[in-house]
Amino acid sequence: MTAFLGFWDRVELWLVTLPFALQVLIMVVMGLPVFLLVATGVERVSDLLVRGMRGLVAPRTAGDGKEVR
C-alpha cells in the first residue's frame, strides 16, 4: 500500500504542476468516460427501482375482471 501511495503522490504532484489548460484536457479525456459509465449505471438502477415501485402501486383486477382501486 505504501508503494501505491508513493506512486499516487508522484502522479498528483506531476498533474498539479501542469498548466491549467492541460489539466482540463487530461480531465476531459480521462474523466468523461468514467462519468458516462457512472451515469449509465445510475440510470439503469433507477429504472429498475421505478419499475419495481410501479408494480407495487399498479391497479389490480378483481376476480370478475373489474379494476380495483
Image (cartoon, rainbow, N blue to C red):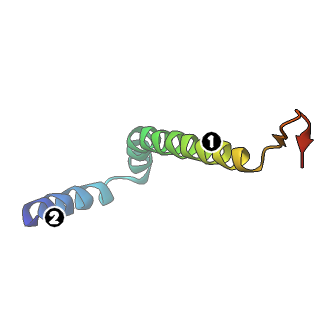
Q: Please tell me whether mark 1 sits on a helix, a strand or a loop.
A: helix
> Which residue in the rendered view is the most extreme toward the bottom?
2
Quarter of the figure with residue 12: bottom left
**Image quadrant in which you'd find residue 14:** bottom left
Where is mark 2, residue-wise? Answer: 5
> Residue 33 got which mark?
none
The kind of secondary structure element at disc 2 is helix
User: Could you tell me which residue is drawn at 89 percent across and 34 percent down?
Assistant: 64
Kind of residue sitting beneath label 2: Leu
Q: Position of residue 26 (x, y in %)?
A: 38, 43
Frontmost residue, 5 versus 27: 5
Q: Residues within 10 Å of mark 1 (few under 14, many from 20)?
A: few
Residue 15, above or below 59? below
17, 29: nearer the viewer: 29
Image spot of residue 45 (x, y percent):
54, 45
Residue linked to disc 1: 47
Counting residues from the start of the chain, the first of labels 2 and 1 encountered is: 2
